[in-house]
Image (cartoon, rainbow, N blue to C red):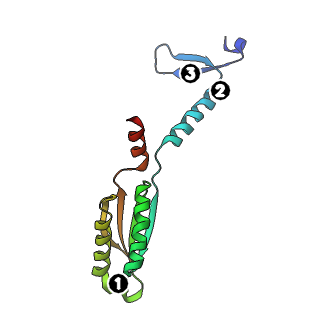
Amino acid sequence: MAQEMELDLVMISDKADPPVCKIIDYQKFLYQLKKKQKEIKANAQKIVVKEIRFGPNTDDHDYNFKLKHAENFLQDGAKVKAYVFFKGRSILFKEQGEILLLRFAQDLEEFGKVEQLPRLEGKRMIMIIAPKGTKKKAEKTSSNQ
């Protein structure tokens, strides 16, 4: 029957009794399968991580400048990876770096929540902050009302 219709005979379930087969255009079936997977992948939420680098002795003006950027990143729905980079002998100021990161987290408290507390990894002290609510969700709820 499949040859008469110029289509393919595809086995759907070989464990069934009797085995289940279907007459379909196999190339068209593969195309539709790829199309569905591509659509699922496009709808998946992509997580963006933005990095902000500090020194252990970062000045107030630089700190405020980077704080504003972090606020914008969190409002756009991106995670923020803030880290203090210790060069040379500045590793002696570990406490200063930790205080700086905790102050940073406290200033961003209304925009995001701390996902990972400050942790020393080699010459870097890293902290990750995730956004509280994304912009897209806020737009959807306001348009539904």
CA distance for labels 2 and 3: 16 Å
The residue labelled by disc 3 is: 11
Q: The residue under label 2 is which amino acid type?
A: Lys
Which class describes the residues within 10 Å of circle 3: few (<14), some (14-19), or many (20+)? few
CB under 8 Å between callouts 1 and 3? no
Q: Position of residue 139 (x, y in %)?
A: 42, 44
- Quarter of the image that includes the N terminus: top right
- For the point 27% across and 80% down, which residue is it? 95
CA distance for labels 2 and 1: 61 Å
The residue labelled by disc 2 is: 28
**Label 3: which secondary element:** strand
Identify which residue, 23 or 124, lies in the foreground: 124
Q: Is residue 112 left or right of residue 140?
A: left
* In this view, the mark in front (2 or 1): 1
Q: Quadrant of residue 74?
A: bottom left
Q: Quadrant of residue 97?
A: bottom left
**In the picture shown, does residue 45 fall above or below 127?**
above
**In the picture shown, does residue 82 fall above or below 91?**
above
Mark earlier in primary sequence (2, 3): 3
Q: Is residue 87 left or right of residue 4?
A: left
